[in-house]
């Protein structure tokens, strides 16, 4: 990176790589070229753009990607201690692949965040569902399909749905690996655009945003059609200190158009963090959500009770109980219970994590499931 002035910096990236396997088809080469500029135009606004080109050659096939990505951000301080901030970005990309047949492409560590809708779409269509693997942010924990998440097909894409009784928590960042089918001898343009703005006034945070993604295969594509995905959302949240603890409230609505499928989601969530008693802290949360699409309707209500306590300087214990009532379509509402207990212990550079949980579904006739995990990780 070169810092030209206090307000202007640029970066040039050049990289080459080569991998060899036992067979000729396993040999691959990569070339990356990128150039970016970051500028602080005013004290309240910044802008950047990035040019990049990536090339992959493996066996008898080649994949080339070229793109241009401008972005901007702003931040204002308004009267009455109000703050207005936001960001917007656009990516224009051209992708071409040369090969006689379609091929399976590998995706490693695609990042997603667990938002209040407790669902997210994988970036590519045509996913082989058997290959989907989900890990936590530092890849020390693998999540299980059926217990922690389920997969659904929506408009050619794969929707990952997170039940509240899973080990995921709101705002967790997860890494997803999978493979998808890329058609042979294909080329096309891709567009990604998003913006988000936030207004904080009198302790109330109002957020609005929109995201758009389009892909136009010129030769062949998924179902031979253009793939489009757009979403807009509006949320209102606040956090207040009260005599009985910290109260947080969030209301959020989302509308998504995925090819020809409409998905609407509404979420209401409230939580109470009780005053700490020494090193012991506890909280209570209640949430309601409802999702409707062209062919599916679901709703759920979740009650969460949790605690955390520092037993000693390098050891903490956490646990809780989640009660989840949910229904899908015209099915009878189901009740699920999850109780869990975990210990984190830092011994020098070694981190020891132990966790046990028990799942029950009293109304569904499912037998109780108990699981224990022990994870060791060391810093180098």
Image (cartoon, helix red, strand yellow):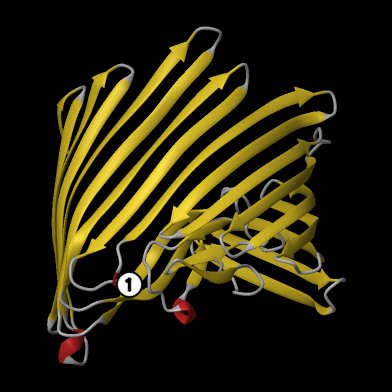
Residue 280 in picture, x, y percent from top left: 80, 42
Residue 273 in picture, x, y percent from top left: 77, 37
Q: Residues within 10 Å of mark 1 (few under 14, many from 20)?
A: some
- Of residues 59 and 120, the one drawn nearer to the viewer in this rendering: 120
Q: Residue furthest bottom?
A: 23
Quadrant containing the C terminus in the rendered view: bottom left
Image-based side of 25 in relation to 141, left or right = left
226, above or below 40, in the image: below
Q: Residue furthest right?
A: 362
58, above or below 213, in the image: below
State the residue at coordinates (20%, 22%): 6
275, above or below 100, in the image: above
User: Which residue position is annotated with label 1?
Assistant: 222
Dot 1: element: helix
Residue 11 in picture, x, y percent from top left: 16, 41
Query: Would you say residue 379 is visible in this rendering?
Result: no
Residue 126 in picture, x, y percent from top left: 38, 74
Q: How many marks do you count on the picture?
A: 1
- Indicate the quadrant where residue 317 lies: bottom right
State the residue at coordinates (57%, 50%): 264
Q: Residue furthest top?
A: 79
State the residue at coordinates (19%, 62%): 188
- Indicate the quadrant where residue 374 lies: bottom right
Quadrant containing the N terminus in the rendered view: top left
15, above or below 184, in the image: above
Image-based side of 185 in relation to 288, left or right = left
- Of residues 215 and 134, the one drawn nearer to the viewer in this rendering: 215
Query: Would you say residue 67 is visible in this rendering?
Result: yes
Image-based side of 163 in relation to 177, left or right = right
State the residue at coordinates (35%, 75%): 180
């Amino acid at each position: 990176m070169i810092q030209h002035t206090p307000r202007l910096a640029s970066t040039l990236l050049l990289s080459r790589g080569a991998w060899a396997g036992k067979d000729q088809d396993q040999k691959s080469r990569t070339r990356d070229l990128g150039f970016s500029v970051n500028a602080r135009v005013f004290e309240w606004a910044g802008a950047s753009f990035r040019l990049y080109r990536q090339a992959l050659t493996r066996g008898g096939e080649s994949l080339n990607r070229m793109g241009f990505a401008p972005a901007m951000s702003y931040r204002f301080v308004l009267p009455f201690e109000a703050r207005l901030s936001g960001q917007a970005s656009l990516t224009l990309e051209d992708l071409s692949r040369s090969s006689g047949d379609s091929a399976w492409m590998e995706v490693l560590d695609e990042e997603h965040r667990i938002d209040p809708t407790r669902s997210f779409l994988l970036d590519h269509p045509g996913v082989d569902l058997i290959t989907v693997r989900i890990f936590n942010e530092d890849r020390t924990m693998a999540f299980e399909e059926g217990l922690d998440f389920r997969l659904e097909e929506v408009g050619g894409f794969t929707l990952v749905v997170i039940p509240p009784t899973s080990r995921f928590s709101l705002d967790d960042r997860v890494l997803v690996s999978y493979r998808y089918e890329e058609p042979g001898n294909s080329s096309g343009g891709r567009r990604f655009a998003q913006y988000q703005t936030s207004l904080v006034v009198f302790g109330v945070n109002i957020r609005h945003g929109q995201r758009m993604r389009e892909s136009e295969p010129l030769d062949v594509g998924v179902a031979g059609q253009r793939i489009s995905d757009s979403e807009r959302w509006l949320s209102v949240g606040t956090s207040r200190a009260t005599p009985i603890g910290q109260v947080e409230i969030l209301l959020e609505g989302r509308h998504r158009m995925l090819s020809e499928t409409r998905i609407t989601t509404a979420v209401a969530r409230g939580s109470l963090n009780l005053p700490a008693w020494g090193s012991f802290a506890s909280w209570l949360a209640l949430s309601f959500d409802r999702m409707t699409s062209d062919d599916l309707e679901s709703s759920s209500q979740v009650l969460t009770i949790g605690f955390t306590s520092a037993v000693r300087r390098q050891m903490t214990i956490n646990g809780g109980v989640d009660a989840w009532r949910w229904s899908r379509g015209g099915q009878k509402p189901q009740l699920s219970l999850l109780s869990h207990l975990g210990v984190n212990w830092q011994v020098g550079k070694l981190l020891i994590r132990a966790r046990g949980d028990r799942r029950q579904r009293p109304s569904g006739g499912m037998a109780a499931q108990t699981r224990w995990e022990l994870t060791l990780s060391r810093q180098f």
